[in-house]
Amino acid sequence: MAITVTINNETREIDAPGDMPLLWALRQELGMVGTKFGCGIGMCGACTVHLDGQAVRSCSLPLSAIGDKKVSTIENLAQSEVGQALQQAWLDEDVMQCGYCQAGQLMSATALLNKNATPSDDEIDAAMQGNICRCACYKRIKTAIAQVAR
Ligand code: FES
C-alpha cells in the first residue's frame, strides 16, 4: 500500500512498507540522493532531514511514523533564507573537505538557526554534537554557523 508523505512541499506517494526508513525511501524510491547514508543507526547525522522543522535522523525514522508532518531535505535548503545564508557561509569558510557529511551538517545547522537566530557557542556545540565529520572540519563548520548567527 502506498504511503503518502509531504516532502519539500510536494505530496509524494511511496510504494513501500511502513517500516522502511525515510532515508531508504528518499534515496531508493524517490531518487533524492542528497541525504546521505552513514551509519544507519542514528549515530552519525549524515542522514539528517527536517520533520516539521526539527532535525531528525532519517535512517531511524520509519515511513509509518511521519503521518501529517512535513519532511524537508537538503534539496530544499536553498528555499529558505537561513539555508541560503548557511550555504554561502559554507563556501566563504571553505568548510568542506570530502563533503560526505555536509548535507547533514547543513540540515542540523539550519534547524538550529531557525529556532535560535543568535545561538551561543555552547548552543552551537550542543546542536551540532550529533553530526560526525570524519575529516574533522568542526572548527570551520562552527565558524560558518557563527557567521550566519551574527
Ligand atoms: Fe543516519 Fe548515521 S546514517 S545517523
Image: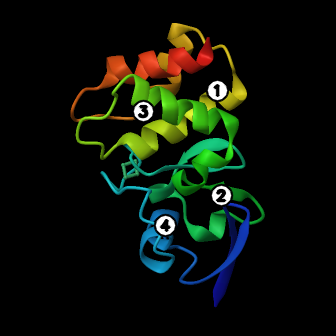
Do labels 2 and 4 touch, CB within 8 Å?
no
Residue 122 in the image: above or below residue 88: above
Is 137 placed left or right of 72 in the picture?
left
Distance (Cα) linking label 3 and label 4: 19 Å
Query: Residue 130: which numbered mark, if any?
Result: 3
* Residue at the disc numbered 1: 113
Q: Nearer the viewer, mark 3 or mark 1?
A: 1
Q: Earlier in the sequence, mark 2 or mark 4?
A: 4
Q: CA distance from mark 1 to mark 2?
A: 17 Å
Q: Residues within 10 Å of mark 1 (few under 14, many from 20)?
A: many
User: Circle 2 sits in a helix, a strand or a loop, which is it?
Assistant: strand
Count neighbours of disc 3 (C-alpha within 10 A) and say few if under 14, some if 14 to 19, many if 20 or more.
some
Q: Residue at x 58, y 20 (%)?
A: 148
Residue 11 quadrant:
bottom right
Where is mark 2, residue-wise? Answer: 71
Residue 140, given in percent of the width and then of the height, sits at: 35, 20
Viewer-side residue, 96 vs 7: 96
Q: Do the numbered discs 3 and 1 sit on residues whose CB atoms are within 8 Å? A: no
Q: Which residue is pictured at 33% across the width and 35% down the height?
A: 132
Q: Nearer the viewer, mark 2 or mark 4?
A: 2
Q: Position of residue 7 (x, y in %)?
A: 66, 64
Give the Cα separation between the discs numbered 1 and 4. 26 Å
Residue 137 position (above or below residue 1): above
Check disc 3 and give the amino acid type: Gly
